[in-house]
Structures are given as structure tokens and as C-alpha cells.
Image (cartoon, helix red, strand yellow):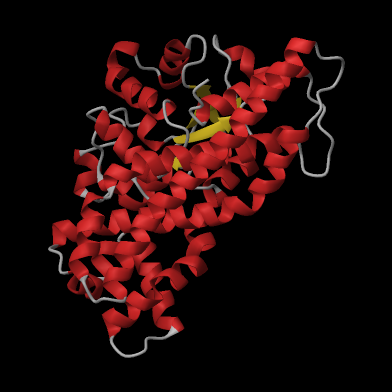
Amino acid sequence: MAIGDLRSLSALENSASTARVLNLRRVHANFSDDPAYSKSPFFYNSTLNRSLIVKHRLRANERSEFVAARNVATKLIIPINENDLKHGAHYVFVGQKNFEQMLSGSIDKDVSELRRDLETLSALDAIPTLDPFLLREQLQRNGIKPAGCYFQITDADVQRMLFFAENEIGDLVRLAVGGEGTAEQAGVMTKKLLSNRGAEQTEGLRMVLQMDHTQYREGIFCWKAFLYYKWQLMELLPKADKVIQEIAHVVPRGSPTYDEKAEISDMRDNISHSFAAAVKSVTATLAIYDNAYQMLTQKSDPKVFKDFLLSAPALFNTLGERLGAVEHLLSFWRFRVPEGKRSQLQANELIDIFGDFETSLEVKS
């Protein structure tokens, strides 16, 4: 299958969210001269290592591509010309019917040569989002350890979260630079912190945190994770009440059976309770970060924050997966039921969607 619309490909590169898109083409452009990039590639196949990977909400005509029902798939986009998107791209969904054969044909490689890369794609498909923090932990669980340059927040999301992050680290900027610190200094420090080379550009913070260079690289990665997750939750929560209310009151089209009505009612309750539990869990985990950060900025105790950052990856699975489930419910519902429009979903469609939400929220029936 092919994509020929330059505008859609360019938009994917320039405005995509971190959780939705992994842009290996951009990583190549920024880090191809980094020895770690060549030593520890994301994909062994060079063509795949310049692809774009997208968490894609399936349209009705695309669901038949899969044996099992699903609403979101991992879409692998392979530019026809690695250096110029104007030529368009091929794409294939991970796990669709005849996936391995289609991928093999797209890049002219035998399936036997792609085994490790197929394992990587399978690991990507098993998580709800592509946020770099959850992604790194998922790959490491599967024995796959690409270089650190592959795990970055997109430029578009950095711009969107900049004001939030400036406010978050203002107290620490004052510790690092002395005196009162200024909004301008906070802005400069934040941009450096969130950049792809943040650990190299914020030596003053390394000294405040009393970390060696290896610890600091890991600490900055983990710190960016918590800034990202806090910002993401702040972005999602204002949308939540309305969507959950719509789900609670949606009426299926047509004439649903008694059993369908009962099933929809039970699923609504499960979704409401599990959604609230997911948000509560994320909020509680982020509070651990807040407490450690306050020990640094208000008690001048860098050890607590340092120890927290170095142990933080253990929390990424919970945060990433639950926030991913929250984002999936909110965005997919809005995709199927645009704001301000009445739902046109029939009972079987609602049951399918609600079942997907239950699974992503890990509802135990």
C-alpha cells in the first residue's frame, strides 16, 4: 500500500505528537554522525531505520486487514526516497494479514533477514503509545537496546510543553544560577533540558544534583519523562469529563436487544470506574516525583531527587501504559463521535469500542 500525499507526510514529521509517532528519518538526520547511532541501531535494516512508525486509529475499511478485531494499529511508513518525502511512501500495518510478506516485498529483503527487526516491531505493537520512556522500557524488557538518541520528545511536543516545563523547573533554575533567577533564564534552561542533547548543555544542573556524567545522562532522560507525563495529564484531563459523560449517556442507533442494552450498561460502569482508577494511579505516581522534587528545591536535599531519578524507569510502565489508555479512550471516542455531533453508532459498534476501552484500561470483569 502507498501514501502519495506530501502534505500528510510533512505534517506527520512537523507536528506529530511524541506518543503517536516515532520518526526514525528525523533521528537519522540529527544523529547519523553519532557513533552510538551506528553501533546500536533501532532496526538493523537501514531502510527500516529511516522509516516512520505511527500509532494509527483504524478506519472501518482498514479493520478487515486484521484477523482479530482492533481499533488501533502500528503503522510502518517507508519513504520511497529516504531523502525526499515528495516521492511518497509505502506503508504496512504490523500484524495485518500477510504482514511479513508485505514488509519483505516493500524493502526487498527476505523475511529470514528481518527476524530481529520483526521482534522489535512486535514489541512496539504491544504497547499503547510510542512515548520514548515507555518505549525504552518495553524494548529493554525484550532484550533490545537501541542507542539513547532514538528516545526523544518530538520538536512539536517540546514547543507545546515549553511554558509548562518552564514553570515546573523555575525553582531549580534559581538553585542552579543563584539569586532570584529570571523567566528568561528559566526559558533558556528548559529548552536545553528538553533538547536532544540536554545532558551536555546543563552542566550547572549536574553539579546541583551531585551526579557523575553517566548518572546525569540517565537522570535527565528520566526527568524529561516526568515533565512530559505531567504535561500530558494536564492536557488530557480537561477533555475527560465531557467524553466520559458522553459515553455514560450515549444511545445506540436502531433497536438494540435486551442483552445488548445490558452489556452496554455493564461496560459503561466498568469504563467509568477503570478510567477514574487509571487517572488516580497516574496522579499518585506523579506525586512521588513532586515530593522528591520538593525535597531538592525546598529542602536543598539533592540526594532524594537524585535517587528518585535513577530509580524512576521502574515507574514508566505504569505511567506510560495508563496514560496511553487514557489518551486512547479520549482520542478514539472523539474520532468516532466528533464534538458537537450526535453519535451514529449502533449497538454492535458500541460494544466493540467499549470492549477495546476495557482492554486498554485493563478492566477485570
Residue nearer the viewer, 187 or 293: 293
Identify the residue at horizontal 60%, vertical 47% (top origin).
11
Identify the residue at horizontal 36%, vertical 26% (top origin).
123
In the rendered structure, the answer to whether residue 237 lies left or right of residue 286 reads: right
In the picture, which quadrant includes the N terminus? top right
User: Is the residue 78 above or below the residue 99 in the image?
Assistant: below
Q: Position of residue 283 (x, y in %)?
A: 46, 51
Q: Quadrant of residue 252?
A: top right
Total marks shown come to: 0
Q: Position of residue 139 (x, y in %)?
A: 30, 33
User: Is the residue 72 above or below the residue 87 in the image?
Assistant: above
Identify the residue at horizontal 73%, vertical 11% (top origin).
259
Furthest residue toward bottom: 179
Residue 52 showing in the rendered view: yes
In the rendered structure, the answer to whether residue 70 lies left or right of residue 292 reads: right
Q: Quadrant of residue 355?
A: top right
User: Is the residue 57 above or below the residue 34 in the image?
Assistant: above
Furthest residue toward right: 254
Q: Quadrant of residue 187?
A: bottom left
Residue 72 showing in the rendered view: no
Q: Position of residue 188 (x, y in %)?
A: 40, 76
Identify the residue at horizontal 37%, vertical 77% (top origin).
171
In the rendered structure, the answer to whether residue 134 lies left or right of residue 59 reads: left
Residue nearer the viewer, 158 or 347: 347
Q: Position of residue 9 (x, y in %)?
A: 58, 40
